[in-house]
Image: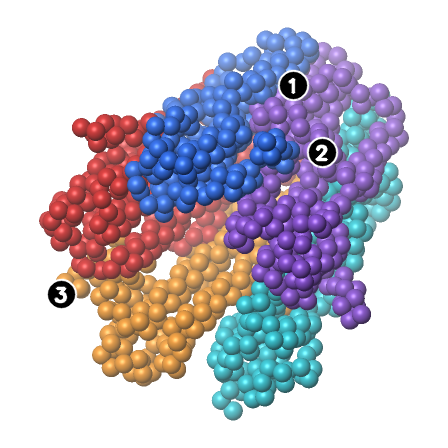
Chain colours: A red, B orange, C cyan, D blue, E purple
Amino acid sequence: MDLATLLGVLGGMGVILGAVALGGGVLLFLNPPSLVIVVGGTIAATLIKFPLKHFLGAFKVALHAFRAHAEDPNKLIEEALKLSTVARKSGLLALENQKISNPFLKQGIQLAVDGNPPEFVRKTLTQDIDLAIERHETGQNIFKAIGDSAPAMGMIGTLIGLVQMLSNMDDPKSIGPAMAVALLTTLYGAVIANAFALPIAEKLALRSKEEQLTKSLILETIGGIQEGLNPRVMETLLKTYLPDGQRAPAAKKKAA
Amino acid sequence: MDLATLLGVLGGMGVILGAVALGGGVLLFLNPPSLVIVVGGTIAATLIKFPLKHFLGAFKVALHAFRAHAEDPNKLIEEALKLSTVARKSGLLALENQKISNPFLKQGIQLAVDGNPPEFVRKTLTQDIDLAIERHETGQNIFKAIGDSAPAMGMIGTLIGLVQMLSNMDDPKSIGPAMAVALLTTLYGAVIANAFALPIAEKLALRSKEEQLTKSLILETIGGIQEGLNPRVMETLLKTYLPDGQRAPAAKKKAA
Amino acid sequence: MDLATLLGVLGGMGVILGAVALGGGVLLFLNPPSLVIVVGGTIAATLIKFPLKHFLGAFKVALHAFRAHAEDPNKLIEEALKLSTVARKSGLLALENQKISNPFLKQGIQLAVDGNPPEFVRKTLTQDIDLAIERHETGQNIFKAIGDSAPAMGMIGTLIGLVQMLSNMDDPKSIGPAMAVALLTTLYGAVIANAFALPIAEKLALRSKEEQLTKSLILETIGGIQEGLNPRVMETLLKTYLPDGQRAPAAKKKAA
Amino acid sequence: MDLATLLGVLGGMGVILGAVALGGGVLLFLNPPSLVIVVGGTIAATLIKFPLKHFLGAFKVALHAFRAHAEDPNKLIEEALKLSTVARKSGLLALENQKISNPFLKQGIQLAVDGNPPEFVRKTLTQDIDLAIERHETGQNIFKAIGDSAPAMGMIGTLIGLVQMLSNMDDPKSIGPAMAVALLTTLYGAVIANAFALPIAEKLALRSKEEQLTKSLILETIGGIQEGLNPRVMETLLKTYLPDGQRAPAAKKKAA
Amino acid sequence: MDLATLLGVLGGMGVILGAVALGGGVLLFLNPPSLVIVVGGTIAATLIKFPLKHFLGAFKVALHAFRAHAEDPNKLIEEALKLSTVARKSGLLALENQKISNPFLKQGIQLAVDGNPPEFVRKTLTQDIDLAIERHETGQNIFKAIGDSAPAMGMIGTLIGLVQMLSNMDDPKSIGPAMAVALLTTLYGAVIANAFALPIAEKLALRSKEEQLTKSLILETIGGIQEGLNPRVMETLLKTYLPDGQRAPAAKKKAA
């Protein structure tokens, strides 16, 4: 569970609802037709931008933003070094029986165990990483697209409301409330974009970057194992994936 | 047929017309001179930006956004593996008689069958891909240009309307309706840009990216066939073009 | 003559003048001091941004946007194949007497005829292309700069007008007309940017891209001739510069 | 201590508080609910965008913007030349006993002393630099995200306030003050973004760039030492890291 | 002296002051507190963004925008060809006594005369160019930062003024003038950004690009001299740095 995402979504809603409640009635801010314009218009624009399949899959993708980042680079490096030691001692084939938790690492080790040459393994895995990034980008882009369209649709709604209000100003008393309603679509659009869609797109981008980093660490591991790199040399190389502060414990271990 | 594009265009129009109808008369929002300023001005600016030939071809290009994405990577991989097996068994020349559905794959196989060296085939096909991307970008750029110009022309129309209204405020009753009319061009510009032009440009960009991916899969296939790559090795390589979830069935097939 | 640019400029002016005339008097929109602020301010800002020589040359550069694109890739490919055939039959030196219309092709052929090694010819021509692009970019950038400055200067003019109006509101009757005048600079800025400067910059960018494509086709041609490439192989390579639809006629010719 | 950052933050606050105090009461500008909307909403959006750990670490990262840049390239070059001379005279191993202040230089020298081949040392250090840049970017991005969200949340707060005010305009006297309160969130958002968050993000980016430059100078040093480069040749190379004006003193030293 | 920059700065000030004077009193537009908010706030934000040293050096850097571009590529090419001829006739060492005006060319020739291998000279000079670009970018970025902050600070000032005015609307007569004063900060910010800071940043960027081009021409020259390139071949290469129109005179000279 990614607490930050959940806290952020609930906190954002809480703050906005609180502001709305404090100033009077919540009902003032509830206008179904306005909601239909903004949400419906945003969905329509997003449908034009993406294939139906991707659009329908967007909510499943959004869950990634709420799910916790599972892979701890420290553990992965430990596992990589263990595999590397096994391969040095008992040969590449001995890796076939090792239990490997990360599926991408497993796939890479399998490619190596199958006797594929290092360049081929590197090419396949690199291509796998690159194409996975492109697929992930589609997910982020849907939320970016929602974040772009919602304020635009909000503005369209407000313009429609203003034109209607301005064409019919016989009753001065009605001008204020009519304008309040016209502004609601702009408010809805701003909330959807800034409290949900754009931040979710950002978190998805970060998730994708983390995964890419993990995969590139794995790529390095497989390459090192195939080259028969000394595990201590490999440790030096893999430790660059950790921030300075986290490298120390491993150094202690090395000393032990 | 790309259902999403059609749904999006119709849905967007529906939502906006609904909002317009709900608030009173649709006629309020129909002002031919305003429409002429926004549409005419946008066409004029787009004509300056692009050659006449590209501009006239834009509507034909827009149809791509409504057409379904034909190429299923699964089928393409299957076809690639079949061709690769044939080439391994009976030589490159045997490919000449194979029925090949995808024209780019056909062109590449023809280049290989003609006895061109792999580097030349790769260079020709890569260049073909790159130059096709550039041509596709012109199509997208026309719709992006429309999406940029329409709101600007809408603003110009509103400014003209405001200047006219402000210069002649003798009758206070006429101020509201005059301002309503002035705002119409801004509304038209926002609708054209956000409910049509920009989303269409986005879908065209996605189409182009999909085609590019398909072509790069084909490039890989031709290269593999010319190198005489083992079909099972090739399958591993081509499967990276599929998301993780879709790779399983093929794995089963391999096991069979 | 690039009809599209001319149509666009005249059409844009027509639409805007029409809107102005329809709503009352054109004189309402003519305010020399406002024009001086926007045009003078934009010229001043552009002068700071660019060297005097480039600024003065901008109008000459703008003509490129009105001039027709002369080079037809089909004809160029035909000429390239003819030259290639001559070189294969009678040697590189035979090219010296060939009549070559495109000056860049002529320059390249001359370099080859002079006995320069292929790498040197490629380096010289590539560098020529790259540096020409940079020079063209200056031209586009001046119009982009005008398109950036004009709306800013328009806003500055409007702010000055508003401050003057707000400081002196004794006569309520004068508020409307004073504000109308204040808005004129914003209108001028928007028109200059969106109906002239930015679209012209875009067309110049397209021209530059077209020329670059032509030159890169020529680069390929010279390289092929120096390598003694088979004209039919070269045709395959050069045809990638054409969209799919235009390649067919050449194929027929090949068959003939 | 980075005086500029401190001066900037205090100066910005001073100028804004001065303007507030001058115009009347500071209390006018203090509205706790408005502050909660903008700060709370910005925190919520930032939490969605980043993992909790990074978010909590942001304040620690911000301190980098206040800390002085420690590494003087002149001193570093001097140290590099000293090490290079020692290595030339007494061999690489003699470097083990040298006192080295910069930890990255120390790490690199250690890698060289350990007998790792130059390509491995270069690869490890380059990777270390690249991955450190990515980690630093997260820090900058949090402040950029705050700078993006704060004005958006300010606008949302103002829209809420406007809707509440417009729905209830019975007492004309209350309109002005209500609108003043509504504008406060926009003001808060603009101040947070433009006087704090965005400038801090910029300074962090500069810090990261400086560190990267220092590290790349060190990379060059280690490479030169491993290649056994002549210290005078190395000086020429390293001096390119200094602006023209600062190179002279070293030249004098060389002459001495 | 770069006439364009001077004309632009004076012209911009003239146009704006003219507009101010024409509409009534210049005093109307002079409000010291408003000036303090915008200028002070902008300085504060810029101080946070940059180190003190760079900030203080910004005015010295700005002078580059007023100084004329000294290096004429035509003369430089002439000098390069002369040096190349000398080196071909009398050897590299003969260059030591040549008078060389451009300091970068001098430095490069010195590196060659000192007997450094071509790859080393190229690496040192390339690195010198790259690092000089980075240093120049800091100068441009300070002016870009000023251009970003000034309008934001102007908006903050206007918001403060509006809040103060709206909270105290007892005297309707004072509303207009109060709002005029509030708008002044926005006006100041827009003028600082669009008539000074952003254009100066642009000119500095152009200067940096010109210098880079000159240096890259020099790099080519030194390389050619070290390779012992034929001066006529070198002329062909260096002439690519000139626009088409300026190459002719040199061709005539060649013929003479």
Asked if residue D225 shows in the view, the reply is yes
In this picture, residue C243 sits left or right of residue C200: left
Q: CA distance from mark 1 to mark 3?
A: 75 Å
The chain under label 1 reads: E
The chain under label 3 reads: B
Q: Is residue E10 above or below residue D10?
A: below
Q: Quadrant of residue E5?
A: top right
Going by the picture, which residue comes out furthest to the bottom? C256
As drawn, the label of residue E62 is 2
Amino acid of disc 2: Ala
Amino acid of disc 3: Ala
The chain under label 2 reads: E
* Location of mark 1 (residue): E160
* Location of mark 3 (residue): B256
In this picture, residue E186 sits left or right of residue B244: right
* Residue E58 percent location from the top left of the image: 67, 30
The secondary structure type at the circle numbered 1 is: helix
Amino acid of disc 1: Ile
Q: Is residue E214 above or below residue C31?
A: below
Q: CA distance from mark 3 to mark 2?
A: 73 Å
Q: CA distance from mark 2 to mark 1?
A: 32 Å
In this picture, residue A157 sits left or right of residue D85: right
* Residue C246 percent location from the top left of the image: 55, 76
* The C terminus of chain D, quarter of image: top right
* Residue B27 percent location from the top left of the image: 63, 48
The secondary structure type at the circle numbered 3 is: loop
